Amino acid sequence: MYFCVFECEGGPHLGATLPAERSHIVDLTAAWPRELGAPPADVAALACKGPAGLDAVKRILDSNAPEIPVAGLRLRAPISRPAKNVFCVGRNYRGHIIEGNIARGVDPNLFPEHIEFFTKAPTAVIGPGDAIPLHAGVTAQLDYEAEFGIIIGQGGCNIDASQAGAAVFGYTIINDITGRDLQRRHGQWFKGKTLDGSCPMGPWVVHKSALADPQALDIKLWVNGELRQSDNTSSMIFPVESIVAQLSAGLTLEPGDIIATGTPSGVGYAMKPPRFLKDGDIIAIEIESIGRLENTVRHS
């Protein structure tokens, strides 16, 4: 199953479709059985309903409910206002670590022994087609990062890696927009990573049951049609299971929590010379079996 959120009568509605066809969706919010309580308006609300919510989705999709063409809909982030910060993993692809080490003048083969976590504030999240603010008065080095995103379902605390799959609801696309000068100036990653509009996400969330192997997906990013990043999630040093297990150690993960899993090589700051984002740049990310996320940088 694939899920998206779209604008309907001034508010968000949750849509769903089966993997074979994504040109039309069923409005789950409108078709939701009232005996199951308030209808979900986004993926987080559906994840909170657990197995009963997924059973209801399956019944709706099997009931010949009216379908809506996706073309023409205004799609939003699948979780437009997360209840908590977006959890993020830094330096998780070997190629990106090497290019970053070279740019900083350190040993190219110096890899992290443990996962490096940081977060982005809920106000950073925007949806497909939304403008990425240039923040010209705040940063002069706005950069892009294509990332494979995890949406937590069952969640839990102290989750064993062998049980991590059961904690996940599904997967999406995230662009970890970063102010590189801010990232370095403040001696930590948070400020440079959490500017308003710096976390484009979506448009689709694929349920884990429809994705055979999350560690075997091509991930690509283009700027104005130029391919900048191209890799596969198999290149992640820390796979999904390790990320969920280590993040949940002593920290409860809840339905609707979001995790960005790191970016491949090809970021702007590591190019020679560096190539940072500018007003009007169009950034497109595709992840195999999930979809395409596209946003434009706009002067703010």
Image (cartoon, rainbow, N blue to C red):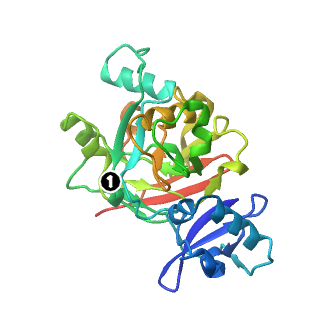
- Residue drawn 55% across the image and 50% down it: 154
Which residue does the image show at 43% across and 25% down from the upper left?
Answer: 97
Would residue 264 appear left or right of 15 to someone viewing this image?
left
Among all residues in the image, which is located at the extreme bottom? 9
Name the spot of residue 105 as percent of width and height, x first.
31, 18
Q: Position of residue 44 (x, y in %)?
A: 51, 61
Q: In the image shown, does 16 or 250 lie closer to the viewer?
A: 250
Side of 94 relative to 54 (left or right):
left
- From this view, report whether residue 121 is shown above or below residue 189: below
At x 62% / y 30%, what residue is drawn?
A: 234
How many badges with numbers are in the image?
Answer: 1
Rendered view: 79 above or below 152 = below
Quarter of image, res 181:
top left
Above-or-below relation of 110 to 148 = above
- Quadrant (top left, top right, bottom left, bottom right) of the C terminus: bottom left
Residue 270 in which image quadrant: top left
Label 1 belongs to which residue? 121
Give 112 or 132, whichever is nearer the viewer: 112
Classify 285 as above or below 297: above
Q: Name the foreground residue: 27 vs 283.
A: 27
Q: Name the image quarter holding residue 19.
A: bottom right
The image quadrant where one finds the N terminus is bottom right
Q: Amino acid at mark 1?
A: Ala
- Numbered disc 1: secondary structure: loop
- Residue 121: give x, y in percent of width and height: 32, 53
What percent of the width, then of the height, locates residue 157? 45, 41
Q: Is residue 128 visible?
A: no
- Viewer-closest of 201 and 280: 201
Within-10-Å neighbours for mark 1: few <14, some 14–19, many 20+: many
Q: Residue at x 64, y 52 (%)?
A: 290
Q: Say whether residue 6 is left or right of residue 20.
A: left
